[in-house]
Every structure is written in C-alpha cells, then in structure tokens.
Image (spheres, rainbow, N blue to C red):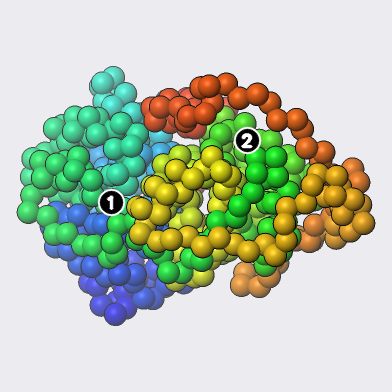
Amino acid sequence: MKFADLGLSDELLRAVTESGYDTPTAIQAGAIPSVLMMRDMIGIAQTGTGKTASFVLPMIDILAHGRARARMPRSLILEPTRELAAQVAENFEKYGKYHKLSMALLIGGVQMGDQVKALEKGVDVLIATPGRLMDLFERGKILLTGCNLLVIDEADRMLDMGFIPDIENICTKLPANRQTLLFSATMPPPIKKLADKFLSNPKTIEVARPASRNENIEQFLVKTSERGKRDTLRDLLDSEDLSTAIIFCNRKTTVRELAKALQRSGFNAGEIHGDMDQSSRIAELDRFKAGTINILVASDVAARGLDVKGVSHVFNFDAPWHPDDYVHRIGRTGRAGAKGRAFTLVTPSDDEAIDNIQKLTGYQIPVHDTGKAEASPVKREEREEREPRRERSARGGRGGKSRAEPKRTEAAVEKPAPKPARKADDRKPAPAKQRQQDDDGPDDGWNGPMPDFLQFGFGT
C-alpha cells in the first residue's frame, strides 16, 4: 500500500513525497482512512511507529475546507509535554506547506501575549498542553465551542502526569458532536474509562501489543557498580560502532555532571533537562540533529516525543524508575524500520527495577559480555596513560559511520570521587508527582527569541 491509496489530496501527497515517504506505516494505513471518514478512533501503537502523521495528515485535508474565527480554534491537539507539542507543530509545518492553514502552539516557556495574539486572529489548528490551555480558557482568551476535532495524544503519559481531570474538563467545553481521536501506547483502565466516556463508537486500531519487544532494537544489560558507571559507559562508547546516541539519566544533576565528564573525555556531548529554558532545549536539539554533537545526555523530559533520524544507540546510565519509561527511552532508536542497540547499566540495587521492566515487556534482557572484568581505579588510570585517546572528528553524513573518535589524555582522566553517604530518602525515588515537577521544570520563564518553527501559522 502507498500513501496515494489512502485518499489524501494531491497537495498533501506532494508534501509527503518531498519529505521522502511513499509507504505508510501500519498505524498510518489503518488510521488515515478512518479519520478521513470522520470516525472516532482509538490508536494503540508503540513509540516510533509514525502515529503523529496518522492524525496530522488527514487533519490537514479535513481542515482545508472552512475558515477560522477569532478565539475559536477549529481543531485541538492535546499533548502532555512541550517537546511533543513542538514535534507535532513541526509535522504540520512539513506536511501542510501547500495548504493555507493557520496554527498556534500553547505551551509553557513561551510568552502568553504572543499566543493570545495568534488566537485572536483565528487558528485552524491549536496544539496545546492541558495546563496552558486551561489557563487561557479561564482568562476568557479562548472559546472551544467551534472545535469539531479533538486529538488526545500520548494518553497513558497524560495519566502518569495527572492530566486526566484536565482532559475531562476540556472535553466538556467542546461540542458534543465532535470527532475525537485518542492515541496511547498502552490502555490501562483509566484510559479505557476516558475513551468510553468521551468517544462515540470508536474504531480501535492496534498495531502491536502494548509494551511488547521491538524486534529492531537489540537490548542488553551491562553489570557495573556505582563507582564504575562512568568508566563502563566510556568503554561502551569506545567499543560500539555508534553514529548518534542518547544517554538517559534519572536526575537533572546527573545529566549535567555526566555531560561535562564526557566532554572532558573528548566526546562531542550535549545535554537536555528540565532546568533548561525552552529556547536552550531547542538549540541543543538542533545541534544534535545537525551533527555538531553526536551524543545527547538527557533526563526523561526528552524520553517521549524526541524524534531524530539515525539514532543508533540508547544508553540508560540509570535504570529507569518506571518500566514504561524504559520502553519509551529505548524507543528513541530502532525507529521506522531501522536497527538500534540499547544498553542499560545496572548495579545490584537495580534488580527490582529490571525485574519490573522484564515483566512488562515479556522479554528477558541478556547480559552484555564486555569480555573483561572491571578494572580497579588504579589500573584504569594506568591503562588510560598507556593508551591515549584518539582525536574525535565530527560525525559523518547520513547512513555512514559518524562516531567521532575519542581523545584520552592524562588531563581527561577522572579519579573516582569518594562515594558520599546516602540518606535514607535517597534510596527510593521521589513520588511520581514530585519527580515530574523536578524533570519538567517551571511552566514559564521564556528568555530567548522565538524559534522559527514555533512561529504561528504556516503555508502561504
């Protein structure tokens, strides 16, 4: 099946072809015809299956007919995070370039005044996070009575973040006879209850068992110790034939410290976490996409919605607290049919977390054989003095080996710091609500210029 067989307009097919696609993924082939027929739909698909285009493409054709009115968006897409909302906006920019549609993005970290001005002009597509949308609604800056198409994306993530009451409230503000699309990687009981309440006779499309193993991703556990984690990671980065890699940590402080340690060791590494303002996050992601850096150290704020072609490796420097986060982390590689490798560094204290991950995925993750026992700190220093690190070059073009070669010097060797005493509270992760606040950062504080793709409106 080709995109031309799905009933999309010639202008839309032209934009899709120019983006390099001609064959839809399973979720796209199943969802697009149903959306075009104005049916309610539930889409259950793992990350990396192309579900964003499965609602963006038909929405563009549906909205091609009609006119936007001031403060009354014609369609609404709800996303749990700023990064996901920005990704959807990029999709509308890319595929809607031959349509005269307007768009607004309501997210934290962007000046509210600019968002209000865009709404006053009228928008065809409103992409929003629930918190900012409710804020503007309560201020009387937006009306939802003209919104006839609603998309609830990443519904299970909305549940994790405590947004379900906001979504229920928003649904009551929209017309009762609207079209509603719900997408989720999993279907826990609260999401099923939400769907039963607000969707009318929906068609369900499931392209893979939720949380099942992605056969395109080779997964490994790497046994190490708390003191030996950095050395273990550096050995993996040296030995793996990586092009681009994302390294996930559980805490923002770990992200910052690890990124600096890798830079001192000669790696082209950057960082992204919740303490960075939105413009800084976008700038760092742009550097990663452009190849200025080929290693990105990230907190879970980037685990969902980060879509970069050609990510060959994912490394879990910390075993994730929640098994669902593991699925979304490693899903940054092995996307759209490509192959990828995922390594999780584990210490004895991670046994329970790994057991939960394996129960969720139904897969016994093999232990990676490094071929050598862990060296003592003294022997590691002696080894690094004998084997200077090779100079890393910038990563190559698309499709080839692009890992820059490392440079090890005496100055780059980090002597292991003494392990600090752990407080009792450190032995357990913070409550989910508190962790989300820690990872996502504040919902305001924009202090940079507006990036081009966040500007409102597209297509001329």
Relative to 244, does residue 349 appear above or below in the rendering?
A: above
Relative to 419, does residue 396 appear above or below in the rendering?
A: below
Q: Quadrant of the rendered structure where residue 294 is? A: bottom right
> Residue 160, image x and y in percent?
33, 37
- The answer to which of marks 2 and 1 sits earlier in the sequence is 1
Q: Residue at x 13, y 59 (%)?
A: 203
Left-right relation of 279 to 230: left
| Residue 289 visible in the picture | no
Q: Nearer the viewer, residue 64 or 261?
A: 261
Label 1: which residue? 186
Q: Residue at x 91, y 46 (%)?
A: 410
Left-right relation of 88 to 291: left
Label 2: which residue? 254
Asked which secondary structure carries label 2, the reply is helix
Look at label 1 and name its amino acid.
Thr
Which quarter of the figure is the C terminus placed in? bottom left
Q: Residue at x 40, y 27 (%)?
A: 431
Relative to 16, does residue 444 appear above or below in the rendering?
A: above
Q: Nearer the viewer, residue 431 or 22?
A: 431
